[in-house]
Image (cartoon, helix red, strand yellow):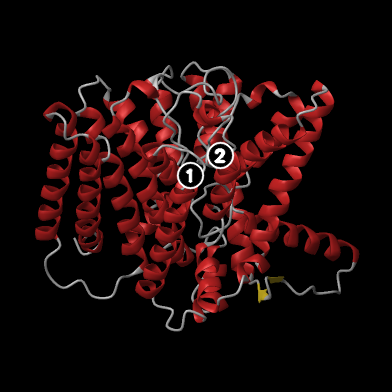
Amino acid sequence: MKLFKPGFRIAVFVMLLWGGGMLLPLLVSLDSWEASRPFVLGAACCFSLAALLHLLARGHIGHLQPRALFMATAFNWLLLSLTGTLPFLLSGLGVTASDSLFESISGITTTGASIFSDIEVLPAGLLLWRSVTQWIGGIGIILVAVAVLPSLKGGGMKLFRSEFSEWNQLEIGRISVIAVHIVRIYLLISLLCLVAYMAFGMPWFDAVNHMMATVSTGGFGMWNNSFGHYEDSHLQWVSSLFMLLGACPFLAIVVSFSNRRLDMLRDPQVIHLLLMTLGSALLIAAWRLWQTGSTEVFDVLESSLFNVVSIATTTGFASEDYGLWGSFPVMILCFLMFSGGASGSTSGGIKLFRYHLLFIFMRENISAALHPEVTLSRQYNGRPIRDDVLLGSLAFFCFVIVSLCVSSSLLALSGLDPVTSITGSLSALMNVGPGFGATIGPVGNYSSLPDLAKYVLCADMLLGRLEYLTLVIIFTREFWKW
């Protein structure tokens, strides 16, 4: 019981917050009991769970050990995913248990994949709830990346532990202090995004929903053609800017605000993110202009940049069916699915710093083959890189490859074609949302997939969002012996 008590104690606060989030859609659902019932009953269930967990968590807990921290993280994300299904199940729309779970996990993990084939017929309250799940999931994963993932010996996240400069510049380095700073920045960016959307002509309700999906790099939209609904408003420029902000390391943003300097622009992850998205967008735009002979250079560049940023930041918005752009753009977009944004951001994916570490490892091995007597200095952003950090990142890449192979095989076993199986698995593991092909592409959805495929993708989304080891570790024999 000692192992579970910290998770229960944290879950009390999480369920109170989650229940309060379920009451937000009442702002647009008070016209009838039928519209407000899913959220009133759902919030009541969350508050009741909070009371029960408070009773179970009574007593002294003591110092929070790493093993209890991992258990608490897995338990709370699973609890959020399960309780997040309640508004869908109680909506009266006939949403099945598998579909409700898929939509809930897709929201809380900020993946943005949807089982609704016609989003535009959904009640306003349910549309807002989908956005709320992503917005809360976005800040949740930032705090997990700051507080939990650096404690793991895998994945290379130890590179961002408290002894490094970003933490020290926050004076105390305590999780609670850092969390408050991050939440404030998250709220500020959300407010700026909301104001920008409305200033460019988006209606207030659309702006609220898209703000939550943009800052969290989630991608849930309100229209069947996603951002294609606003094709003549140039809102894609605004969205691209805030998707990029959501994919930047929030710890670096906090330090920049604290020092009143743009220190984050010197972060290698931010530099690589900007270069990668701009370079890919220019390549794709040039290809499209050359292939089509179009003279609408500005419009082609706008749509190319928007969709590149959406994929690279794992947001999942789409302005058109980019699967029709040709094989070269599709290959670039497929590779961008693997990238993700920075560590400590709302985006999914592998994270850019791990590619930097992989490049260092490759360079070191090539140099060792040519000059065995030479020892290279390993550094990332001016910090030394230890062997365990480098090996942790390599182990992370192995987890990604194995998960992709197993997941794609299971999807194929459920009856899906190879393109849908591979890109669906990749999209879920990287928390992107849309895949490729007619079924789950940017103009498709996941509604027609069999239940087995949906459950596999649910597991993929959680694995990718919690960076594999956080979940995998609790299923090992060593974890329970420790």
Q: Is residue 79 in sight in this rendering?
A: yes
Q: Is residue 462 in sight in this rendering?
A: no
Residue 19 is situated, as x and y percent measured from the top left of the image, at 20, 48
Circle 2: residue type: Leu
Mark 2 residue element: helix
Residue 197: image tag:
1
Residue nearer the viewer, 194 or 56: 194
Residue 372 is situated, as x and y percent measured from the top left of the image, at 86, 69
91 sits to left or right of 448: left
Disc 1 crowd rating (10 Å Cα; few below 14, some 14-19, many 20+) is many
Asked if the residue under mark 2 is in contact with the one under mark 1, i.e. CB atoms within 8 Å, the reply is yes
Residue found at the far bottom of this picture: 171
**Residue located beneath label 2 in the image:** 235
Disc 2 crowd rating (10 Å Cα; few below 14, some 14-19, many 20+) is many
Residue 225 is situated, as x and y percent measured from the top left of the image, at 51, 24
Asked if 38 appears above or below 470 in the picture, the reply is above
Residue nearer the viewer, 295 or 330: 295
Asked if 347 appears above or below 337 in the picture, the reply is below
Q: What residue is shown at x 72% (from left), y 40% (from top)?
A: 281
Considering the image in quadrants, where does the C terminus appear? bottom left
Mark 1 residue element: helix
